[in-house]
Amino acid sequence: MGREQVCYLLLGLGAGSGVFTSSKHPKLYPIKAGKLLLKNTEEFSKLLGFPFWIAPLVDDDFGSNNYRFFFNLNNYIRNDTEARRVCESVIFSASLLYGSPISDGEGELFFRFPRAQSDDSINYEEIVKADEEISPPWGRQFFYPSSTIRRYSLFPDSVVAEILKVAQVCLKNSRVLSSLAFLHESAKSFFVNSVDIEELLVNKNREAINTLEQNSWETSVQNSFKAIEALIGDPSNNDKKFFKKLEEAGIDPLLLVGYEEKKPIYQAIRDLNILRDKKAAHGSTPNRRIRLIEILNCQGCREEVVKLGIEYLLGRKIWLEAKCE
């Protein structure tokens, strides 16, 4: 029996190229992706050391086929661990640019299928059927593949191109990938779009209204601090040592951050550490209710630290102004 040869479909993110004609018309029209997206896709593939490409996922049931990301490891070997690392680097980078998680993080971020006969297009029904044929019902990748595979976020080409640039930084630096993973998880527990923050500040001192909200806020606080810690390490109580850590990560310790009351980012990080220790890290702590302003400042601090750290490694600012609101 020969070794299993597989390809992978990245779940959760489209290639930003819109829709082309139905597969009932055999001609595949030229890809519409912008030059920058194609360039960054090729760079990403080169960094990986194996094919990572854009192709239409042919879906006869819906009569319209969307461009998606596919990849295969060298010699089409199956290595789900490496596939997972590739997908996490892209999806977590997308969540950073978008502002909130584009995936709920439940289950795998890829769909694995037998080696494709052609890289030009992949047929949805064929890859799902192949999974059903080789796996028993309890061993299939997804019980409801239709909703899992067909559901994804679609952004302009320029945004997707930038996502792949940030993903390259993740692949080169495991600490960045860990930081973005924690950022992704913290945003799942609490995230407010920037356009809505001013309105919420009217009730800035309100506490979590119930146990479930309190638990979500606590989880967000803990993962927010982990996101920062993954990049800069534990914040030292010694200003000189702490400032050096921040500067080495490309962060100005005196940069002002926060909502309503601005404070230097080094102090914001320390405040977040205190908030975690006193209100979020222990279940037996009395009077641990978190206030809205505290969790909002937590969100702002984690995003700024991670963004600045990645920009330092990238050598330029991230195109956050291009993100979809």
Image (cartoon, rainbow, N blue to C red):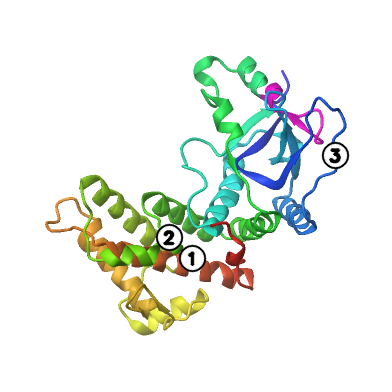
Residue 324 is marked as none
Amino acid on which the number 3 mark rests in the picture: Tyr
Label 2 close to label 3 by CB (< 8 Å) = no
Quarter of the view holding residue 129: top right
- Which numbered disc, 3 or 1, marks the residue that appears first in the sequence? 3
Q: Which residues are magenta?
A: 114-127
Gap between marks 2 and 3, in whole Å?
Answer: 42 Å
Quarter of the view holding residue 156: bottom right
Q: Is residue 212 above or below residue 60?
A: below
Image x and y of residue 124, in percent = 69, 27
- Residue visible at 78% across and 55% down? 34
Image x and y of residue 87, in percent = 59, 45
Residue 227 is marked as 2
Query: Residue tagged by mark 3?
Result: 29
- Which numbered disc, 2 or 3, marks the residue that appears first in the sequence? 3
- Depth-wise, is mark 3 or mark 1 nearer the camera? 3
Q: Neighbour class for label 3 at 10 Å: few (<14), some, many (≥20)?
A: few
Secondary structure state at the residue bearing disc 3? loop
Gap between marks 3 and 1, in whole Å?
Answer: 39 Å
Label 1 close to label 2 by CB (< 8 Å) = yes
Question: Which residue is at the front of the view, 205 or 91?
Answer: 205
- Residue visible at 37% across and 73% down? 258
Question: Which residue is at the front of the view, 65 or 75?
Answer: 65
Amino acid on which the number 2 mark rests in the picture: Ala
Query: Residue tagged by mark 1?
Result: 306
Image x and y of residue 23, in percent = 79, 28
Amino acid on which the number 1 mark rests in the picture: Val
Q: Is residue 294 above or below residue 253?
A: above
Label 3 close to label 1 by CB (< 8 Å) = no
